[in-house]
C-alpha cells in the first residue's frame, strides 16, 4: 500500500486514468452529482422562502463541482488507502462540493442552521474558519452532510461538502488560489503577510457592511 512518500504525479495520473474508465467509478460520480442536486434544491428552496420572509435573498450565488479524478487518487494515496470505489465512498468526504456565496456573514449561519434542521440531512462534520480563520487568513464555513438520494434500486446515502462564504471571503480565496500557482515568487513571506492583511481588512469590511444592514433594517421595524 502506497503512502504520500511513495507515489509520484505520473503514478497518480495512471491510476486515475484506469479507475475513471470503470463503470463502477462512473456510477459513483453520477450518484455524487445527484447528491449535489439534492443539496442545491434544498438551498434554493430556503433562498426563496427567505426572500419572501425578509425581502432579500440570503445568498448571491451557488456553485458545485465534483473533485477531479486525479485529485481523488492523490488524496487517497496520501492517506495510504487502496484506490477503489469502496474506499472513495468511505473515506473521501469532499468528492461532491457545493459553494454558497452570501452577502452577509449572518446569513451564512442562518442558512447553515436551517439546512441542519431538515430531518433528512445529517451533519457529519463542521469546521468554522470564519470564527477561527486559518493562519493565512482564509475564512469559510465548511460542513459535511450525509444526504439521501433516491435511485431506481432504492435510497442511498451520500456525502456532500458545503462551503459558505461572503462575497469578500470568496474574492480573497479566489485570488489566493491563483497566486499559489505562480511558479516563482521572489519574496513569498512578504506576499503571505500582505495576503493575510488583505484577509483581515476584508473581514473588517464584512463586519461593517453587516452593521450597516442591521441599522437600516432597524429603521423599518
Image (cartoon, grey):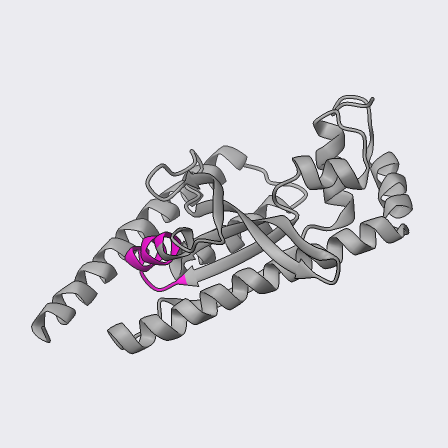
Nearest the viewer among 124 and 77 is 124
Q: Is residue 160 above or below residue 73?
A: below
Residue at left offset 32%, top offset 70%: 50
- Identify the image quadrant of residue 30: bottom right
Nearest the viewer among 124 and 135 is 124
Residue at left offset 70%, top offset 56%: 154
- Percent position (x, y) of residue 82? 81, 29
Helix, strand or loop: magenta stretch: helix
- Percent position (x, y) of residue 176? 52, 48
Q: Horizontal placement of 175 versus 214: left or right?
A: right
- Residue 118, magenta (yes or no): no
Q: Is residue 207 above or below residue 70?
A: below
Q: Horizontal placement of 198 versus 210: left or right?
A: right
* Number of numbered tags placed on the structure image: 0
Q: Is residue 220 above or below residue 4?
A: below
- Identify the image quadrant of residue 94: top right
- Percent position (x, y) of residue 116? 41, 51
Magenta part of the chain: 102-113
- Percent position (x, y) of residue 65? 64, 58
Q: Horizontal placement of 208 versus 221: left or right?
A: right
* Quadrant in which the C terminus appears: bottom left
Residue at left offset 32%, top offset 40%: 131
Q: Is residue 203 above or below residue 11?
A: below
Nearest the viewer among 131 and 40 is 40
Amino acid at each position: 500500500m502506497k503512502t504520500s512518500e511513495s507515489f509520484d504525479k505520473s503514478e497518480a495520473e495512471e491510476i486515475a486514468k484506469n479507475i475513471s474508465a470503470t463503470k463502477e467509478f462512473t456510477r459513483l460520480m453520477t450518484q455524487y452529482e445527484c447528491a449535489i442536486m439534492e443539496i442545491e434544491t434544498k438551498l434554493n428552496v430556503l433562498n426563496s422562502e427567505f426572500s419572501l420572509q425578509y425581502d432579500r435573498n440570503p445568498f448571491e450565488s451557488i456553485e458545485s463541482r465534483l473533485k477531479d479524478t486525479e485529485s481523488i487518487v492523490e488524496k487517497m494515496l496520501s492517506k495510504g488507502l487502496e484506490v477503489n470505489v469502496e474506499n472513495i465512498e468511505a473515506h473521501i468526504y469532499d468528492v461532491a462540493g457545493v459553494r454558497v456565496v452570501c452577502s452577509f456573514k449572518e446569513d451564512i449561519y442562518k442558512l447553515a442552521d436551517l439546512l441542519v434542521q431538515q430531518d433528512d440531512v445529517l451533519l457529519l462534520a463542521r469546521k468554522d474558519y470564519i470564527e477561527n480563520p486559518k493562519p493565512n487568513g482564509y475564512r469559510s464555513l465548511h460542513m459535511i452532510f450525509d444526504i439521501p438520494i433516491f435511485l431506481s434500486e432504492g435510497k442511498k446515502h451520500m456525502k456532500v461538502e458545503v462551503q459558505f462564504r461572503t462575497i469578500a471571503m470568496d474574492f480573497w480565496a479566489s485570488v489566493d488560489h491563483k497566486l499559489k500557482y505562480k511558479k516563482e515568487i521572489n519574496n513569498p513571506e512578504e506576499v503571505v503577510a500582505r495576503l493575510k492583511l488583505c484577509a483581515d481588512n476584508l473581514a473588517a469590511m464584512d463586519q461593517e457592511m453587516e452593521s450597516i444592514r442591521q441599522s437600516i433594517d432597524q429603521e423599518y421595524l
